[in-house]
């Protein structure tokens, strides 16, 4: 049986990356897809861990070959998710998480309509400004652009299945983990994953007589 595909999106500064990291610690059954990007690594980031950092030329060549299940231009940089890698992991039964923006999420849903969309929002625009400023990784003009784009990004939360408000980090992390568990416990998945256990409970005397 295929694994679940989770999409986590948010405006910059909403705490998406930190919440995803917390989820991976809480639930080792979830594996994050490492996206390709043309942006420069930030302090502390490593190639192949946070992102696969590539040149614009290589990214465009990969996109032309159809290597990406989704790709988008976000804040002046390209991002993309490997179609082959995600497909192979899902077929193996692994739960995969994509940390992508709303544009990429829309592309993925066209290919994988049963993907579970989760949108993270900050408690306020003041909180968003504070987080963007305090992380110290972006110049003032970039922060201003991210704030301007945030309103449009947040408007797309209506396209997602779940919305988590990150006003308390520990609670938000637990809510994110709860979504993952809830999706695994849906009836159809439980029947498929645990048919050998459930069938005898449904028919303790053996299979029902044929009509």
Image (spheres, grey):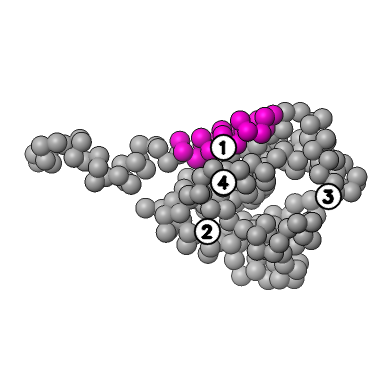
- Mark pair 3, 4: CA separation: 25 Å
Span shown in magenta: 157-182
How would you rate the neighbour count of disc 3 (Cα within 10 Å): few for under 14, some for 14-19, many for 20 or more? few
Secondary structure at numbered mark 3? loop
How would you rate the neighbour count of disc 1 (Cα within 10 Å): few for under 14, some for 14-19, many for 20 or more? many
Q: Residue furthest right?
A: 140
Q: Would you name the residue on which mark 3 appears?
A: 137
Which quadrant of the structure image shows residue 34? Answer: bottom right
Q: Nearer the viewer, mark 2 or mark 3?
A: 3
- Mark pair 4, 2: CA separation: 20 Å
Q: Earlier in the sequence, mark 2 or mark 3?
A: 2
Q: Earlier in the sequence, mark 1 or mark 2?
A: 2
- Mark pair 1, 4: CA separation: 12 Å
Q: For residue 176, which numbered disc appears in the image?
A: 1
Q: Earlier in the sequence, mark 4 or mark 2?
A: 4
Q: Are marks 1 and 4 in contact (CB under 8 Å)?
A: no
Q: Nearer the viewer, mark 4 or mark 2?
A: 4
Secondary structure at numbered mark 1? helix
Does the image show residue 39? no
Q: Main secondary structure of the magenta part?
A: helix
Q: Earlier in the sequence, mark 1 or mark 3?
A: 3
Residue in view at x 21 percent, y 41 percent: 199
Secondary structure at numbered mark 4? helix
Q: Is 171 a magenta residue?
A: yes
Q: Judge whether 200 appears above or below 30 on screen.
A: above
Q: Would you name the residue on which mark 2 appears?
A: 86
In percent of width and height, residue 101 lies at 67, 47
Q: Earlier in the sequence, mark 3 or mark 4?
A: 4
Secondary structure at numbered mark 2? helix
């Amino acid at each position: 049986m295929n694994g679940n595909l989770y999409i986590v999106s948010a405006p910059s500064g909403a705490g998406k990356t930190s919440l995803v990291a917390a989820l991976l610690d809480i639930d080792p059954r979830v594996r994050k897809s490492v996206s390709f990007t043309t942006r420069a690594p930030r302090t502390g980031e490593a190639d192949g861990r946070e992102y696969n950092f590539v040149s614009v030329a290589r990214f465009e060549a990969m996109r032309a070959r159809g290597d990406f299940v989704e790709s988008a231009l976000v804040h002046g940089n390209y991002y993309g998710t490997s179609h082959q890698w995600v497909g192979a992991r899902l077929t193996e039964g692994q739960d995969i998480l994509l940390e992508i923006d709303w544009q990429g999420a829309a592309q993925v849903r066209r290919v994988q309509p049963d993907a579970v969309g989760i949108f993270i929002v900050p408690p306020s625009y003041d909180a968003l400004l504070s987080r963007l400023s305090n992380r110290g990784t972006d110049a003032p003009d970039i922060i201003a652009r991210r704030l301007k784009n945030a309103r449009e990004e947040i408007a797309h939360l209506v396209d997602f299945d779940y919305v988590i408000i990150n006003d308390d980090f520990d609670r938000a992390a637990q809510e994110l983990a709860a979504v993952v568990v809830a999706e695994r416990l849906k009836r159809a998945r439980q029947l498929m994953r645990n048919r050998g256990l459930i069938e005898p409970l449904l028919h303790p005397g053996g299979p029902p007589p044929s009509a």
